[in-house]
Image (spheres, grey):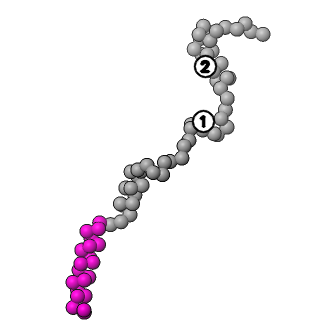
Amino acid sequence: MEKYIHSEKLSKKKRRELDTLRRGSWNGFSPVTRRPENPKAYNRQKARKRSDDFPDRAFFFQKKLQYFEENSSIF
């Protein structure tokens, strides 16, 4: 059995070897704490995605106005 030497007195290389032996494997599991997203919180990415899905409202308003002007003679 080897004599115990405090880690502060070991060389950097030996300390690294000991640390790697002591550390265990997480077996593919990430130890980072995970929390579900707050549904009430404002999400900028989600808001931006919604605005990108729809073309300009001014464009729709203009087309709707043209449609009513063209078809107003019918009524």
Residue 12 place in picture, x, y as percent: 57, 14
- Residue at x 74% of width, y 9% of height: 2
- Residue at x 32% of width, y 66% of height: 55
Residues rendered magenta in the picture: 56-75
- Of the image marks 1 and 2, the number of the one nearer the N terminus: 2
Give SS at disc 2: helix
Q: Quadrant of the C terminus?
A: bottom left
Give SS at disc 1: loop
Location of mark 1 (residue)? 31
**Which amino acid is tagged 2?**
Arg
- Residue at x 27% of width, y 70% of height: 59
Location of mark 2 (residue)? 16
Residue 8 place in picture, x, y as percent: 59, 10
Q: Nearer the viewer, mark 1 or mark 2?
A: 1
Task: Give the label on residue 72, or none.
Answer: none
Question: Is residue 46 shown above or below 27?
Answer: below
Q: Is residue 73 left or right of residue 25?
A: left
**Which amino acid is tagged 1?**
Pro
